[in-house]
Image (tube, rainbow, N blue to C red):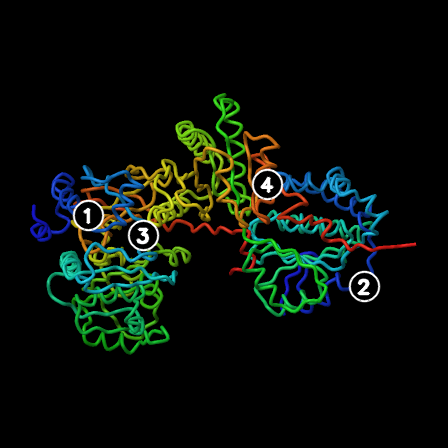
C-alpha cells in the first residue's frame, strides 16, 4: 500500500499511521471558536503568501475563510438556536474525494465538515501538479505544527494515491460520511465499496450550467455591456470552463434581430478579452475547437459557428439538449423569446444558471416550474463559480452534523 | 494540364508560378469532387469555411482536422468502389485513422511515392537495410505508423534485412552479413530517426560497416533525440564519421497515413521539401490565417492524391514554419519547411474525473 501523505507530509504504508485514526475522541464542538480561529489564521497566511496571493482562486479561498465569512455561514444556519434546540455534533470521520480540476475545492469541502467538528480525511488527485496547491499544503502543515493548533493534526489529513480499490475501500469502511465530488463514474465506483451501514454520503454528480441573458436597452451602454462581458468571461474561462458550474450554453432572451446583434457583439468582445488574458496554449486550443466545431456540424448540433478568433468559439444550438463543450472557451448559444422557453432544457443535469436582466420574482418563478433536482443555483452572471455551503441541493454544513433530541 | 501529365513532370522542378498554374486547377477539381461526393466535407466546407463553390487560391481550400479520420470513416466513393481501408495508429494514440482507398487513389499513391523516391534513389531497387524489427509488420489489420512506413518504402529495395530482433535488440550478425555482401555498394537504409540513432549511430561494431554509397531515409520526429541533445547536424556527422555515409545522402522524411504517397523529403539545407503533389501552409493558430514565411503555426498539408476520401487538405497538430521557397541550395523548387513539434495536448480536467487516469 502506497499512500502519499501531504498533510502530514510523509509516505504512509498503513492507514493506521494517519493521525485522524489516532484518537477516538472528538475535542472540537460544532462551531467551536478554535476552528474559526484556525481558519482565520490560515486565511491570513494565504492572503499574505507571496506566491498564493498572485492566484485569484487562492485569494478567493483566503477571503472565504475569514472569520467574518465563516460567522456568516454559522449565522445563516442559526447555529445558536440549533445548539439550544437540536444539540448538533459532528458525524465523525468524513472522507472527501475531491476533483482534480479545481485545486482549491478540497478546502471548501473540508471547511464545511470541519466547522461541524468532524475529522477529515481528504483524497486529492494524484495528478495535482500546480505548485500553488502544494504551497497551500505547506501552509497547513506549518499551521498545525504551531502549538496552539496541534489539535488540528488529527482533524485534517490530506493524502493522494493512484487508483486503488483496496485503499478506497479501507477508507470507505472507516468513514462515517463521504463527500464524493468526482461525478457519476466516481460515485458508481464508491457505491460498490463496503461502508458502515450508517454512512452518510453526499454525491456530486456530473452537471452542466447555463447563462441566461435578456437583451435590454440598458446593454447598449458600452460600459454596462463591457461589464457584463467581463462577468461572462469570468464564468466561462475560470477553470478552463471545466467546472460543473461553468456555463456551456448562453441563452439569449429577446427578439430575433436584437439577439443576433447581441451574439455578434458578445462574440467580438469576449474573444478580445480571452486573447488578451487567457493563457492556455493557443495551438492546442485551436485544434480542440476545430475538432469540436466539425463534430457539432456533422452531428447536426450546430449550423452557424462563430470562430473568427480561436480564443473563443460560439456555436448555435439546434438540439433541445445542451452537449458538453470541449472547454477553454467553447460555448453554445440559443436565442429564445421568453424565459419559459428555457424549460425543455432544464433537466437534472443542470446545476447553475447565471442570470442577467431578470428580477428575483422571475428567477423564483422559473425555479418553481422546473423539475425537481434540476437547477440548484441561480446567481448573477459572474458568480457562477463562487462556491458556498449550499451546493447541488445540499446544505453541506448541516449535512455534516448529527442532531440529538434531549427531552426533560 | 491533365493530372496524369502533371504526375510525370520531374519532381521538385516547378517554381511558384508554374506550380500554381498547374496545381490549383487540379486541386479545385478535387475540391469540387469531394464537395459533391462527401457530405461531411460539403457540410464542413459550407458550415465552417462558408465555401461551397470553386476555390480561387490554394489557401482557400477548406481543411479537415487530422483527427476526423480517427472519429469517422470518410469517403468520397460508393461502397462498391472501396478497394481497401488503410488503418494506422500513431505511436502514442490507440485509436487508428481509417483511410478509404479505391483502386485509383491507391495506385496514385504508389505512383507518387515512386516518382519522389526515384528522384533520389534512381530507378533500380537497392539492397535494403531496415533498422527495425520485422515484428512491427505482424499485425496486418492495423499497422503502426512505423509499420506503414516500412511497408511503403520496402518496394524500393531488395534483399531486405531487418537488424532488430523481436525484442528490439540489435542483431549484429545481420549487420555483419550485410557488410560482407554490400560494403561500399549503393544500398538503401530506412528506419525511425531515434532507432537509427540508437542502434546504428551508437552501435559498437567490431567489424567494418562501409556505408559510403548508402542512402539513408529516416522519419518519426526529433523529440526523443532533442531530449538527448542530438540535432540533425550531430545525427548526420556521427553517422558520417562512423560509417562514411555522405551527408547529402541522408534524408529525413515526413509523411502521414492520411496522405500516403505525397511525402516530404529533406532537402540539402536540412528542411522538408514539398514534392510536386503537395503544398504546405502554415496557419496562425489564433484565427487560421496564413502565416508568412518564417512565422510558426499549425501545419496544413495539401495533396493532389486523395480522391477516394476527402484528405486532400488536412490541418495537422504539428507546429512548423516555412523556411523558404524555390531557392534550396540543391536546386529543388517549391516550398520547404521545418517542424518544431506538436501542439501541446492541453489536459483538461473536469469535475467528473477524480479517478480517470
Residue A55 appears in view: no
To which residue does mark 2 refer?
A24
Q: Mark 1 points at which residue?
A: B36
Disc 4 to disc 3, how far (Cα)? 44 Å
Chain letter for the residue marked with disc 3 in the picture: B
Which picture quadrant has residue B88?
A: bottom left
Q: Which residue has dot 3 on it?
A: B66
Do marks 2 and 3 both belong to one polypeptide chain?
no
Relative to B51, residue A164 above or below: below
Residue A257's disc number: none
Q: Where is residue A366 in the image (x, y as percent from the top left)?
A: 57, 38
Q: In which quarter of the image is the C terminus of chain A?
A: bottom right
Mark whose residue sits in front, 4 or 3: 4
Label 3 crowd bin: few (<14), some (14–19), many (20+), radius 10 Å: many
Name the front one of labels 1 and 4. Answer: 4
Q: Residue furthest right?
A: A408
Horizontal side of residue A43 vs A55, given as left or right: right
Label 2, label 4: how far apart the Cα atoms are = 44 Å
Q: Is mark 1 on a helix, strand or loop?
A: helix
Amino acid at each position: 500500500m502506497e499512500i502519499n501523505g501531504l498533510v502530514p507530509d510523509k509516505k504512509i504504508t498503513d492507514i493506521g499511521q494517519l493521525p485522524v485514526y489516532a484518537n477516538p475522541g472528538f475535542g472540537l464542538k460544532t462551531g467551536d471558536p478554535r476552528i474559526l480561529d484556525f481558519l482565520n489564521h490560515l486565511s491570513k497566511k494565504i492572503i499574505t503568501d507571496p506566491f498564493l496571493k498572485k492566484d485569484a482562486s487562492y485569494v478567493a479561498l483566503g477571503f472565504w475563510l475569514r472569520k467574518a465569512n465563516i460567522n456568516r455561514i454559522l449565522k445563516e444556519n442559526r447555529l445558536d438556536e440549533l445548539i439550544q434546540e437540536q444539540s448538533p455534533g459532528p458525524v465523525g470521520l468524513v472522507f472527501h474525494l475531491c476533483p482534480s480540476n479545481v485545486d482549491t475545492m478540497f478546502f471548501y469541502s473540508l471547511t464545511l465538515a470541519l466547522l461541524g467538528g468532524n475529522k477529515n480525511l481528504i483524497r486529492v488527485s494524484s495528478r495535482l501538479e500546480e505548485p500553488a496547491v502544494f504551497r497551500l499544503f505547506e501552509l497547513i502543515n506549518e499551521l498545525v505544527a504551531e502549538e496552539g493548533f496541534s489539535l488540528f493534526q488529527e482533524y485534517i489529513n490530506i493524502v493522494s494515491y493512484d487508483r486503488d480499490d483496496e485503499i478506497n475501500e479501507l477508507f470507505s469502511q472507516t468513514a462515517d460520511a463521504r463527500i464524493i465530488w468526482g461525478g457519476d463514474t466516481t460515485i458508481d465506483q464508491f457505491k460498490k465499496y463496503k461502508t458502515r451501514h450508517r454512512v452518510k454520503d453526499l454525491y456530486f454528480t456530473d452537471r452542466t450550467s447555463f447563462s441566461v441573458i435578456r437583451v435590454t436597452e440598458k446593454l447598449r451602454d458600452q460600459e454596462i455591456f463591457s461589464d457584463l462581458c467581463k462577468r461572462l468571461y469570468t464564468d466561462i474561462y475560470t477553470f478552463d470552463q471545466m467546472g460543473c458550474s461553468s456555463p456551456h450554453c448562453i441563452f439569449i432572451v429577446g427578439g430575433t434581430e436584437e439577439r443576433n446583434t447581441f451574439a455578434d457583439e458578445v462574440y467580438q468582445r469576449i474573444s478580445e478579452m480571452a486573447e488578451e488574458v487567457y493563457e492556455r496554449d493557443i495551438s492546442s486550443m485551436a485544434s480542440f475547437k476545430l475538432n469540436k466545431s466539425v463534430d457539432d456540424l456533422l452531428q447536426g448540433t450546430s449550423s452557424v459557428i462563430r470562430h473568427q478568433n480561436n480564443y473563443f468559439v460560439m456555436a448555435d444550438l439546434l438540439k433541445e439538449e445542451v452537449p458538453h463543450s470541449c472547454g477553454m472557451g467553447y460555448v453554445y448559444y440559443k436565442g429564445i423569446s421568453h424565459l419559459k422557453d428555457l424549460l425543455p432544457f432544464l433537466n437534472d443535469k443542470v446545476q447553475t444558471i447565471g442570470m442577467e436582466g431578470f428580477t428575483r420574482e422571475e428567477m423564483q418563478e422559473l425555479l418553481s416550474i422546473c423539475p425537481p433536482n434540476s437547477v440548484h443555483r441561480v446567481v448573477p452572471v459572474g458568480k457562477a463559480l463562487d462556491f458556498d455551503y449550499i451546493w447541488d441541493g445540499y446544505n453541506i454544513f448541516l449535512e455534516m452534523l448529527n442532531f440529538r433530541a434531549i427531552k426533560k | 494540364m491533365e493530372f496524369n501529365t502533371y504526375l510525370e513532370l520531374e519532381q521538385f522542378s516547378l517554381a511558384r508560378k508554374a506550380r500554381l498554374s498547374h496545381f490549383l486547377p487540379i486541386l479545385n477539381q478535387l475540391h469540387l469532387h469531394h464537395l459533391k461526393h462527401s457530405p461531411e466535407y460539403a457540410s464542413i466546407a459550407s458550415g465552417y469555411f462558408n465555401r461551397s463553390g470553386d476555390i480561387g487560391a490554394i489557401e482557400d481550400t477548406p481543411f479537415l482536422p487530422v483527427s476526423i479520420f480517427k472519429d469517422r470513416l470518410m469517403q468520397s466513393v460508393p461502397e462498391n468502389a472501396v478497394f481497401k481501408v488503410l488503418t494506422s495508429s500513431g505511436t502514442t494514440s490507440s485509436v487508428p485513422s481509417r483511410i478509404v482507398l479505391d483502386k485509383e487513389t491507391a495506385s496514385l499513391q504508389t505512383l507518387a511515392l515512386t516518382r519522389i523516391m526515384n528522384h533520389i534513389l534512381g530507378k533500380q531497387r537497392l539492397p535494403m537495410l531496415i533498422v527495425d524489427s520485422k515484428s512491427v509488420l505482424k499485425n496486418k489489420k492495423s499497422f503502426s505508423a512505423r509499420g506503414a512506413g516500412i511497408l511503403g518504402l520496402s518496394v524500393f529495395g531488395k534483399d531486405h534485412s531487418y537488424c532488430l530482433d523481436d525484442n528490439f535488440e540489435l542483431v549484429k550478425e545481420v549487420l555483419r552479413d550485410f557488410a560482407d555482401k554490400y560494403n561500399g555498394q549503393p544500398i538503401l537504409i530506412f528506419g525511425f530517426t531515434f532507432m537509427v540513432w540508437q542502434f546504428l549511430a551508437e552501435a559498437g561494431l567490431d567489424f567494418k560497416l562501409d556505408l559510403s554509397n548508402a542512402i539513408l531515409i529516416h522519419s518519426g520526429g526529433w523529440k526523443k533525440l532533442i531530449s538527448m541533445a542530438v540535432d540533425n547536424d550531430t545525427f548526420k556527422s556521427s553517422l558520417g564519421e562512423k560509417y562514411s555515409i555522405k551527408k547529402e545522402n541522408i534524408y529525413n522524411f515526413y509523411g502521414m497515413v492520411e496522405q500516403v504517397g505525397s511525402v516530404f523529403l529533406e532537402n540539402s539545407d536540412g528542411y522538408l521539401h514539398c514534392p510536386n503533389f503537395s503544398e504546405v501552409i502554415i496557419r496562425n493558430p489564433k484565427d487560421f490565417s496564413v502565416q508568412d514565411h518564417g512565422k510558426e503555426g499549425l501545419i496544413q498539408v495539401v495533396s493532389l492524391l486523395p480522391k477516394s476520401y476527402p484528405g486532400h487538405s488536412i490541418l495537422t497538430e504539428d507546429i512548423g514554419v516555412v523556411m523558404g521557397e524555390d531557392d534550396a541550395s540543391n536546386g529543388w523548387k517549391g516550398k520547404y519547411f521545418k517542424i518544431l513539434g506538436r501542439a501541446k495536448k492541453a489536459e483538461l480536467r473536469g469535475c467528473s474525473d477524480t479517478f480517470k487516469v
